[in-house]
Image (spheres, coloured by chain):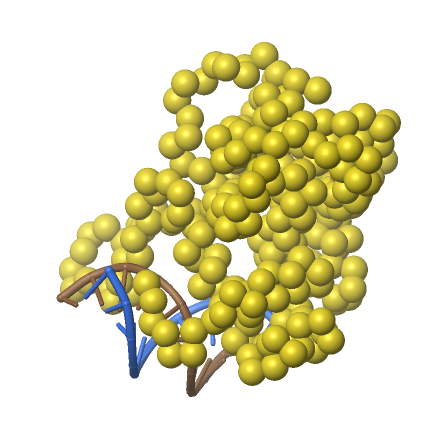
Chain colours: A yellow, B blue, C brown
Amino acid sequence: MGAPKQKWTSEEEEALRRGVLKHGAGKWRTIQKDPEFSPVLSSRSNIDLKDKWRNLSFSASGLGSRDKQRVPRPKAPSSSPSPSPQLLLLPATNNVAEASPPEDCEKSPQDDKTPSPKFSMILEALGELKEPNGSEVTTICNFIEIDKSYKLTDSYAKRALAPMKDPSLKKKDSAKSSKAAKGQGLFTAASPALGAAEAAATKVADAEAKSHLANEHMMEVERIGKMAEETESLLELASELYERCSRGEVLTILQVAHREF
DNA sequence: GTAGGGTTATTG
DNA sequence: CAATAACCCTAC
């Protein structure tokens, strides 16, 4: 831990998080130039932001779980007949099945073995918030959004070979790539997957303003993490939340975790 | 300007 | 001595 040369302060780190929340991961220069974070990140360059965010993400990958992800030294051993490091580049994005019906709630005793790195990031972020009453759905949705922007764009861009030309419409590009790569039948024509997720965050925020949602802790959040290991599950969850919240319903994290809403 | 890889320095 | 985090260089 730690190698303080010019260690990042809490303010700087929070500014970075907020910047990613606002503009999305990847717009380091936009974040750095933003008048909100300029005074805090004045001493940090856009590259520094990227490096810090990378270190944060990497640390979050092996957090909160017994996931032993040691990096094999990039030095190739002299003579090893096993040139296949079982690295998961893409967590089986073509496996959209596993719809996880609401009946398998208390079943499946054999999970929580390998939480997806995406959710580890979210859990890590939620854990750092350390809200006394637990984290609100808005916060979770925000982090889910970040996650999608950061990881999905990269993955699907490579798969669909769809370079993002328009930086301001990254989400649409991602959604398009997602649909092109898999042909989602879940979200049909109504709303693109990522669009629904974004709308979900907004709608949930609105609903949250009316009445505060329930407060659970890491255990409940972990339950969500178990059932939503895949990004498709995240999108599906966001879509359902969007539908419910659009109708004015108020959902608690517990309900969401048990998927009984 | 961003992403990725590699190197250095500090802490445990 | 190893792991981690900041720093630096290179490629796209």
Q: In this view, does A47 lie above or below A257?
A: below
Residue A190 at least partly seen: yes
Closer to the camera in the image, A258 or A162: A258
Q: Which residue lies furthest to the front in this view?
A: A132
Residue A122 at least partly seen: no
At horizontal 63% and vertical 53% (from top left) the residue drawn is A146
Q: Which residue lies furthest to the top in this view?
A: A103
Quarter-of-image position of residue A11: bottom right
Residue A138 in the image, given as x and y percentages of width and height? 69, 42
Q: In the image, is C2 to the left or to the right of A92?
A: left
At horizontal 38% and vertical 32% (from top left) the residue drawn is A113
**Image quarter (top left, top right, bottom left or bottom right) of the N terminus of chain A:** bottom left
Count the labels in the image.
0
Residue A144 in the image, given as x and y percentages of width and height? 63, 45
Q: In the image, is A36 to the left or to the right of A86?
A: right
Quarter-of-image position of residue C2: bottom left
At horizontal 56% and vertical 41% (from top left) the residue drawn is A132
